[in-house]
């Protein structure tokens, strides 16, 4: 086996095994939230392209930086499933099916939604901060971006991809996803690209907090074991 093949196997084997085992055990029942998200996104796409449905979808799921903050926060959960009108809907559906599906198998449906919403919310809040800072600031945005409709699953997809890679130690793949988002901003400097970077930053903070909690839990468990009352001549029970 070549060096590249060994490295690829080491990189992806834990993630591949988790997805394979989850699908083998439950098949489509392993991803009910993902399937519901795909159907909801397709429904919103159909509705917003109809004369009777466009304004309705805008009212419940369209977010702009110029909107009041409370309104943006209310609309953000559904905005994740409203496809951008200027992009092909199959791209959004494929992203949700693949990345949300893998994340749901590996993390569970509620953690998937939590990380996805955290990433989307980070992008939404960044847009307001960036516009306030102005185009002269390194992370600032032009005032015209306040009118841009900010919907779609892309920020959640990027955040979930990085988080799942971290959880399953596919660090090279996670770093590659982040690098591609940086290239996106360099090549096409727009609001969406910078929101993707904000989503990655939020997820990295979430990873750091999770890792810190796990380390703290391990230390507490060790301290509890050392003070469990076994004498110096006694050995604690062994668990396989």
Image (tube, rainbow, N blue to C red):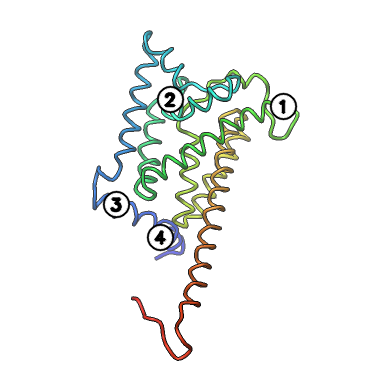
Which residue occupies the foreground of this view, 182 or 239? 239
On screen, residue 36 above or below 27: above
Please tell me which residue is depicted at 48% across the width and 21% down the height of the picture. 62
User: Between disc 1 and disc 4, whose residue precedes?
Assistant: 4
| 106 relative position to 229: left or right | left
On screen, residue 54 above or below 167: above
Please tell me which residue is depicted at 56% across the width and 58% down the height of the picture. 212
User: Between disc 2 and disc 1, whose residue precedes?
Assistant: 2
Please tell me which residue is depicted at 29% across the width and 55% down the height of the picture. 21
Determine which of the numbered discs, if any, sits on residue 22 in the image.
3
Which residue occupies the foreground of this view, 126 or 231? 231
User: Between disc 4 and disc 3, whose residue precedes?
Assistant: 4
User: Between disc 2 and disc 3, whose residue precedes?
Assistant: 3
On screen, residue 61 above or below 204: above
Q: CA distance from mark 2 to mark 4?
A: 35 Å
Contact between labelled residues 4 and 2, with CB atoms less than 8 Å apart: no
Q: Which residue is mark 1?
A: 135
Residue 10's spot in the image, x, y percent? 43, 62
- Of circles 2 and 4, the one toward us is 2
Q: Which residue is mark 2?
A: 83
Determine which of the numbered discs, if any, sits on residue 9 in the image.
4
Please tell me which residue is depicted at 69% across the width and 34% down the height of the picture. 139
């Amino acid at each position: 086996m070549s060096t590249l093949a060994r490295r690829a196997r080491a990189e992806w084997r834990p993630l591949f095994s988790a997805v394979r085992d989850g699908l083998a055990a439950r098949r489509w029942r392993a991803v009910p939230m993902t399937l519901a998200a795909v159907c909801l996104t397709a429904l919103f796409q159909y509705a917003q392209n109809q004369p009777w449905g466009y304004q309705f979808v805008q009212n419940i799921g369209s977010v702009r930086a110029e909107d009041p903050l409370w309104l943006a926060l209310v609309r953000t959960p559904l905005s994740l499933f409203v496809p951008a009108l200027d992009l092909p809907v199959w791209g959004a559906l494929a992203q949700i099916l693949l990345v949300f599906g893998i994340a749901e198998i590996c993390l569970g449906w509620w953690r998937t939604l939590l990380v996805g919403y955290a990433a989307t919310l980070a992008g939404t809040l960044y847009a307001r901060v960036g516009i306030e800072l102005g185009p002269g600031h390194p992370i600032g945005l032009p005032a015209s971006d306040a009118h841009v409709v900010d919907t779609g699953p892309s920020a959640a997809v990027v955040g979930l991809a990085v988080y799942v890679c971290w959880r399953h130690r596919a660090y090279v793949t996670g770093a590659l996803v982040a690098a591609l988002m940086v290239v996106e901003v360099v090549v096409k400097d727009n609001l969406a690209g910078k929101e993707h970077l904000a989503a990655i930053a939020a997820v990295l903070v979430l990873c750091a907090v999770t890792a810190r909690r796990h380390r703290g839990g391990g230390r507490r468990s060790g301290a509890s074991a050392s003070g469990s009352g076994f004498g110096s001549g006694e050995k604690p029970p062994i668990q396989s």
